[in-house]
Structure formats: C-alpha cells, structure tokens
Amino acid sequence: MAEMRDPKETGAHVNRVASYSIEIYERGQEKEGIDEKEIAGKRDVLRMAAMLHDVGKVAISDVILKKPAKLTEDEYSIMKQHTVLGAELFLNGHSEFDKAAMEVSLNHHERWDGKGYPGSRGCNDRLTLGGIF
C-alpha cells in the first residue's frame, strides 16, 4: 500500500527501519540479560510493526506528502499527525502485534531526549502504550 504512494523509496525505507529496529532491540535485550528465546519470540512482531511505522501517512494529503519544497509550519504540523493517525489504526487491537504496531506508529519520531513528536506527550488521550518491548 505504501509503495503505491512512493514506489521509489518506501520499500527500501521500511526494510531499513525494520532492520535497525531489530538490531537495537536485540542489543538492548542482550545487554539486559534477556534470554535469546524470549528475544526471538518478539523479533518478528517488532519487524512487522516497524515496517508499518509510517502507515498513518496514507491519511496525509499528497499535496503535503509529496511536496518537493520545505513544508510550512502548518504543513509540518499536519505531517506530524501521521504518527497518531497510524497508531489509531491499531487502537482496538487485541494481539501482541496490534499493540506493538500502535506503539511503534505512535512513537517512531520520538527522540532519546524527549524532543520528538508526538509520542506519548502529544497523542490522542485514547491512545495508551502497552509497553510491548
């Protein structure tokens, strides 16, 4: 679906994000002494969730999404909502994957210093994080 909107870059991008996510996850879990079996049990869920991190962009206008120039402040505010819009797709989910996809969609632009967007600070009140990872 995403490749239909951006066939040149989307496939490569989602695969890179999934690979980096798995690498960070595995290293962090190993450092914490988590058993390889437990790590392996969540690896595929994280990979699939990471590949869907930008799914909320399907709700963003192509005028903004494909704009070749720098976005205005208003356009950037709209673009930032793709995290919440993506997370809302998984809001009523019941599986481990649904919870992971919601968390990844919502927080993939958060930063280590808390200055990312919108994540847990700017999200819709209906969204709560499940702490899957």
Image: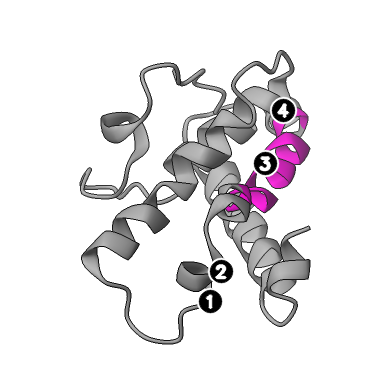
Mark 3–mark 4 CB contact (< 8 Å): yes
SS assignment at label 3? helix
Mark 2–mark 1 CB contact (< 8 Å): yes
Residue named by callout 3: 49
The answer to which of 108 and 81 lies nearer the viewer is 81
**58, above or below 90, in the image:** below
What mark, if any, has residue 62 been given in the picture? 2
Q: CA distance from mark 2 to mark 1?
A: 5 Å
* Residue 105 horizontal/vertical position (percent): 54, 41
| Prevalent SS, magenta region | helix
Q: Amino acid at mark 4?
A: Phe
Question: Which contiguous range is marked in magenta?
Answer: 41-55
Q: CA distance from mark 1 to mark 3?
A: 24 Å
Residue named by callout 1: 66
Give the side of residue 3 with respect to residue 110, left or right. Answer: right
Mark 1, other Cα within 10 Å: few <14 / some 14–19 / many ≥20 = few
Q: CA distance from mark 2 to mark 4?
A: 28 Å
The answer to which of 29 and 132 lies nearer the viewer is 132
Given this view, does label 2 or label 4 mark the residue nearer the observer? 2
At x 60%, y 60%, the residue is: 17
Q: Amino acid at mark 3?
A: Ala
Mark 4, other Cα within 10 Å: few <14 / some 14–19 / many ≥20 = some
Residue named by callout 4: 97
At x 75%, y 77%, the residue is: 7
Mark sitting earlier along the chain (1/3): 3
